């Protein structure tokens, strides 16, 4: 009974009307503005505010009211601070995230912010901290026995950077390298041509003769020649490597669990006579979701927007106003490059153009619950960050655009 009481005591109110009085002015006891939030039968919030800043405060309020634990977990993931809560079980994750140097990217983004963006993020952060201070924290804080830390604008930027990284691509460079080592140059390229759809909607190693009519052919290639060539390719693959090893290699960077697309239909093709727009932004399913549906309106203005928001971001990522609708999808641009560089024995120098150059080394301290702090040396070359401490001593350098 006590556990149930604890759980229910931390749940937000999903029905009715909430009126928030923002404090400010010459005295902190003076009411600065009033924000009204109404939740419908499905719990989706509708925010009514007298200014854009108040609307952003309202977004932060409902995000934190419903998803504070998810937000806290995600920002800690981006900052490489999960081990402060979970101990050694998340140390490898923190090491990887610290090596990626998200905090440095966040700092550069903060320097480019417009005054309006700074105001929006500050109002959002104020709301998150207001909820964390004035309402019971989610049950995870009690179960894991830790305290909420003040939300800052940098945390929102970190969550956005993390999302961008998860949606980025490296052009399957590591996959290509692994396949070449496993199968040899010629056979690896043959495999990749199928994997990239250059022969139509036919993909190894799942191809069979029934797929042949769907294969696009060019030049003097016939279905018979292609069938014989594929049989030879599969035969060579089977002789050089086991099915398990090949499957593991192909899935190393090609899990094929998500898709990304966007489309629009003109009004002449719809039942209503109005255009339709839809998209899939290439985010995998999760519980809780990446998305949060809401509506907000700035009273007395044309700013009335509803749609899907992303946690940590004070706005609507995909949605519509009274006059336009918009959506996003992942362009899957190749923004990550990998290099293999030779290091000296003590990992302080790397070889470039026949000369040894000094690495730039930054020391990171990762706090680990119920254990000693972990010291991580993040090493850099002129091309990017060495991932060698994470990948068993390989001189692998990652460069992000």
Image (cartoon, rainbow, N blue to C red):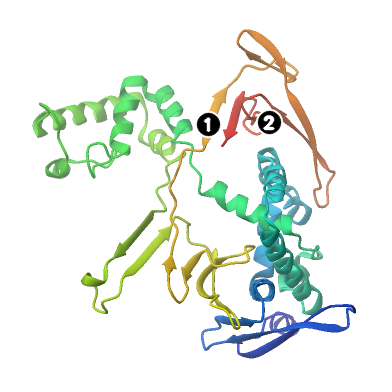
Q: What label does residue 308 carry, if any?
A: none
Q: Nearer the viewer, residue 202 or 301?
A: 301
Q: Nearer the viewer, residue 126 or 250?
A: 126
Q: Nearer the viewer, residue 301 or 100?
A: 301
Graded by Cα atoms within 10 Å as few (under 14), some (14 to 19) or many (20 or more), the crowding at tag 2 reads some
Q: What label does residue 389 carry, if any?
A: 2
Dot in front, 2 or 1? 1
Q: What label does residue 337 carry, if any?
A: 1
Q: Is residue 89 visible to us here?
A: no
Graded by Cα atoms within 10 Å as few (under 14), some (14 to 19) or many (20 or more), the crowding at tag 1 reads some
Tally of numbered tags: 2
Quadrant position of the C terminus in the picture: top right
* Left or right position of 137 against 390: right
Seen at 39% across and 61% down, the residue is: 279
Q: Can you give x and y, in whole percent of width and height, for residue 395 in the image?
A: 62, 23
Quadrant position of the N terminus in the picture: bottom right
Q: Can you give x and y, in whole percent of width and height, for residue 135 in the image?
A: 77, 79
Q: Is residue 135 above or below residue 357?
A: below
């Amino acid at each position: 009974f006590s556990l149930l009481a604890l759980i229910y005591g931390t749940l937000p109110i999903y029905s009715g009307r909430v009126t928030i009085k923002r404090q400010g002015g010459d005295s902190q006891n003076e009411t600065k503005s009033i924000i009204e939030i109404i939740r419908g039968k499905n719990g989706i919030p509708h925010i009514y505010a007298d200014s854009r800043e108040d609307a952003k405060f309202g977004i932060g309020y409902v995000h934190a009211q419903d998803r504070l634990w998810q937000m806290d977990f995600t920002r800690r993931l981006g900052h490489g601070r999960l081990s402060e809560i979970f101990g050694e079980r998340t140390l490898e994750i923190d090491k990887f995230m610290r090596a990626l140097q998200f905090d440095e990217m966040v700092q550069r983004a903060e320097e480019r912010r417009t005054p309006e963006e700074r105001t929006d993020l500050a109002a959002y952060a104020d709301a998150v901290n207001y909820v964390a201070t004035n309402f019971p924290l989610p049950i995870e804080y009690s179960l894991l026995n830790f305290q909420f830390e003040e939300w800052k604008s940098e945390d929102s930027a970190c969550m956005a950077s993390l999302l961008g990284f998860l949606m980025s691509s490296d052009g399957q460079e590591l996959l290509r390298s692994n396949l070449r080592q496993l199968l040899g140059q010629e056979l690896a390229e043959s495999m990749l041509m199928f994997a990239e759809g250059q022969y139509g909607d036919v993909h190894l190693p799942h191809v069979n003769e029934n797929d042949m009519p769907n294969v696009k052919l060019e030049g003097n290639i016939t279905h018979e020649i292609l069938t014989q060539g594929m049989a030879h390719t599969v035969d060579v693959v089977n002789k050089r490597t086991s099915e398990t090893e090949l499957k593991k290699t192909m899935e190393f960077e090609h899990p094929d669990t998500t898709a990304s697309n966007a489309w629009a239909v003109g009004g002449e093709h719809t039942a209503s006579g109005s255009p339709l727009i839809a998209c899939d932004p290439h985010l995998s399913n999760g519980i809780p979701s990446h998305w949060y549906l809401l509506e907000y309106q700035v009273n007395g203005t044309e700013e009335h927007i509803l749609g899907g928001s992303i946690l940590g971001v004070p706005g609507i990522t995909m949605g519509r106003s009274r006059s336009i609708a918009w959506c996003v999808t992942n362009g899957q641009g190749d923004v990550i490059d990998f290099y293999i560089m030779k290091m000296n024995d003590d990992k302080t120098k790397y070889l470039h153009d026949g000369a040894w150059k000094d690495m730039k080394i930054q020391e990171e301290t990762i706090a680990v619950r119920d254990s000693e702090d972990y010291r991580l040396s993040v090493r850099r070359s002129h091309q990017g960050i060495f991932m060698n401490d994470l990948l068993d001593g390989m001189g692998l350098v990652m460069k992000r655009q």
